[in-house]
Amino acid sequence: MPSLPEIVRLGAGDSSAIPSGFRGGVVAIGNFDGVHRGHQALLRTAIDEAARHGTHPVVLTFEPHPRAVLRPETAMPRLTAERARLRVLGAFGIGNVVVVDFDRAFAAIEADEFAVRILGDRLEARAVIVGEGFRFGRGRGGDVDLLRRSGRFDVIAIPPVADAGGATFSSGRVRDALAAGDIAAANVLLGYRWFVEGVVVDGDKRGRELGFPTANLALDAPIGLKLGIYAVTLTRAGGQPLAAVASYGVRPMFESAAPLLEVHVFDFAGSLYGERVAVTFFDPIRGEERFASVEALVARMHVDSAIAREMLAGAGPGTPLDAALAAIA
């Protein structure tokens, strides 16, 4: 059964001992935001190369996303916050992940130092797998050629992976799909159903007053999803997915200050307060609307719930990656 990977954290100037499970492997490097189908080609290569070398695959990724540190004015919503990203990596078969605590000090490390000291000396990489456009080190001065010139490990550069129409898989395309509320397109690009994680927190009990009690999530990271109503499932730790309908929005009739994710779980009477849960998105139902009265809103909520039940009942089992993710929810 797949599980969350083991992780080790590295920072600039870090000299702590690296556990043996993270040394001597085949290292795949990237941001892996979303772990979409392009990323999965890189991971698959790392797994295959590790088998060829008689060793194990290791992923090296960055937290927070380097853009949030280097160009905060252009920072974008995350597709997978750290724990969600680890879940997908674990479901894909990655057991060891090096998380770089990325800050300006780490960004200032010279490219050759990153290649030799971190990848060569500390991780003892047998091979390194990157996208062919990978840049790293101070001023993004390092590239695939520099990695090869280090002479410390084999280097495999993966070209961009495209879909049947010739468009490259990218995190940006997934963000665009979610911003448009096109869950189906996002899920095709990802190769699994997009999900978010968070902790259920106390709310204003508005849903309960309306006859639709909701789990209000404090999300691990802001999301760029179009405001609206969606058919979803909610999964508790170690539990089965529960059919639900979700609202992501500012609740125009009640004027929330910021978008909220509220989930109404069908046929459920227990308490979820304080629990970490995953919410998996299937289909959009409608955009966010302002209704003429509370009664009109409640009537529409009944319709939304019926539509969500029908959508979920007709949904297939998903991809093998969905099945693996369910096993470690």
Image: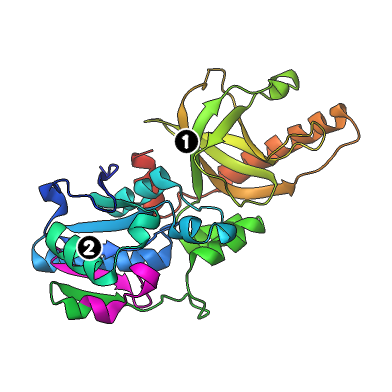
The residue depicted at 53 percent of the width and 79 percent of the height is 165
Q: What is the CA distance from the residue labelled 1 to the residue labelled 2?
A: 33 Å
Q: Residue 123: horizontal and vertical position, in percent?
A: 16, 58
| Extent of the magenta region | 123-147
Image quarter in which the N terminus is found: top left
Residue at the right extreme, as displayed: 292
The residue that label 1 is drawn on is 241
Q: Amino acid at mark 1?
A: Pro
Q: Residue at x 65, y 41 (%)?
A: 308
Q: Residue furthest left?
A: 54
**Disc 2 element:** strand
**Percent x, y of residue 66:** 43, 59
Q: Is 292 inside the magenta-drawn segment?
A: no
Residue 64 relative to residue 301: left or right: left
Whether residue 26 appears in this view of the structure is: no
Q: Is residue 257 above or below residue 117?
A: above
Query: Magenta segment: does it hold 140?
Result: yes
- Mark 1 or 2: the one toward you: 2
Question: What number is the disc on residue 27?
Answer: 2
Secondary structure type for disc 1? loop
**Can you give x and y, in whole percent of width and height, for residue 119 in the image?**
19, 63
- Does 78 sit left or right of 133 as displayed? right
Q: Is residue 62 above or below residue 229?
A: below
Q: Name which quarter of the figure residue 105 lies in.
A: bottom left
> Image height check: is 4 above or below 176?
above
